[in-house]
Amino acid sequence: MTADVLPGDIWIAVLQYLSVEDLAHLAQTSKWFHALVNEYGWKAYAKSHPRDSWSLSKSLQHWTPYDRVRYHTVTDRNWTLPSFVARPLASRWTGKLQPVLSINNSRLLVAAANHIYSYTFGRSAHPGEAPSIQFECAYTTNKVLQATRDITSIECVPDGGYDRTVYIGYADGSLERVVLPACKPGVEGPIHIEQSFREKRPYHGNEPVESISSCGDNLLSLSSNGTAVFFTNSANPSPQFLELRARSWATHLSHRHAVLGASSLTPLTVHTIHESHISSTPSHILTNSTHDDHPRPSAVYGICGTPPSAPWGASEQVIISGWFDGLVNVHDLRSSRRAHRIPGVTSYPAGGALYPVMSLCDPWLFEPVYDVSSGGGGSCHIAAGTARHSVVAFWDVRAANKGWSVHAPGNDSSPVYSVILESSRLFGATQSRPFVLDFGPGAKEETYPKLTKPPREDGLKRRDSSGVGFYVTRYGHSRPQ
């Protein structure tokens, strides 16, 4: 049968159901199919298989559909191996800090003590090459170094494409909306953010602001004493307050749910969002137990959702959380597996507590999980920053029993306090410095910021086989039988 027997629009519809391998093979059969796949096939595949990536966003806008598909296909293969470049983004800081990360389409922000370090994302010169990550400048929020003015949380919010507006929480309970001023070429040292660039949000008294989350124009902040505040990114927000009455740690905000993590018998609760406010009582309680009705007190330190393109659960109903017990739990709010009685708890939803649909752990390192993020190859991976030895654990939910862990560059005894996972890169931060694990192709020495100290003096091991990254220790989660 010749290709012209069927109308072209039918062939175009067929292309939407083909894999990368099928499209590549089809394009080699004839000039007619080669032109058809190039014009419609790669575009259809890229549209139906999006990859969330902040650092790639500028480059993806200028790559052809074929270049985008090729880059993501190679990246997915590297995740499967796994194969990556491990690079610190800076030399070691002085002292032991507790950094937090935030990201938008233009830059990665690393907040440590009273400093914010800005790294900008470049545009790759050639299709398929890794876009650059370069140090832009440093900011300081306080002219005098004071522990009470340390930054404890930071969140980027939309500002019409300028990508310079953030909300910052401090150890003394302050919460500010800050517009980062433009970096000045040739100026050495950090730029102090003047008051004209800052707006106070006096919501949390003197309690440290542990977490800030955003979704669209809505924000959710949480202080250590359990005061949660739901408000909008506007000049005159009308905040709604919610008291958890427990030591609190983490937030996650979506269009439909506000998720709060604390230390208690019921440390993970979900509140429904109704237009401009959230429900005062939980709509769901998410437990760490999988088989009994006797939960132990625990704590949740990190919460995230799934990427919009995740084939294993691209829904706001799926919630991923990192626990003090060393577990990463995946809950699906649509699940019917519930405990109808929780001893010691007098107030809970009528449906009881929701069991996790998946529980993950590093069997060699039962340490608290400080942060979680999802994305990676095929949008099917979960990353967890753990409390010791600068370890990041990874799981592909399509084969969760084949997880693996890796030590950050420098391999110090620090926790990994914050992680951000996108399609091809994992950004993380230890007490010593920020780092990146890059799974994408085309990485070069100039892709990353230049280090200011010799590697050995900076606590780094020898170069890896690529000559670009540094050697790091990796191990699998499988126990010998």
Image (tube, grey):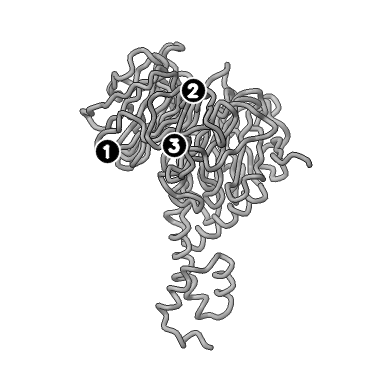
Label 2, label 1: how far apart the Cα atoms are: 35 Å
Q: Earlier in the sequence, mark 3 or mark 2?
A: 3
Q: Nearer the viewer, residue 308 or 464?
A: 308
Q: Amino acid at mark 1?
A: His
- The residue positioned 41% from the left and 43% from the top of the image is 105
Q: Could you tell whether 159 is left or right of 324 in the image?
A: left
Q: Is residue 134 visible?
A: no
Q: Earlier in the sequence, mark 3 or mark 1?
A: 3
Rendered location of residue 42, percent (x, y): 48, 66
- The residue positioned 67% from the left and 50% from the top of the image is 81
Label 3, label 1: how far apart the Cα atoms are: 27 Å
Q: Could you tell whether 144 is left or right of 422 in the image?
A: left
- The residue positioned 29% from the left and 21% from the top of the image is 200
The count of marks equals 3
Q: What quarter of the picture does the C terminus occupy?
A: top right
Q: Which residue is mark 1?
A: 274
Q: Could you tell whether 466 is left or right of 446 in the image?
A: right
Q: Is residue 138 above or below residue 383?
A: above
Q: Amino acid at mark 2?
A: Ala
Tag 2 secondary structure: strand
Rendered location of residue 275, percent (x, y): 25, 39
The label number, if any, that marks residue 103 in the structure image: 3
Q: Earlier in the sequence, mark 2 or mark 1?
A: 2
Q: Which residue is mark 2?
A: 112
Q: Amino acid at mark 3?
A: Ile
Q: Is residue 238 above or below residue 316?
A: above
Q: Nearer the viewer, residue 327 or 168?
A: 327
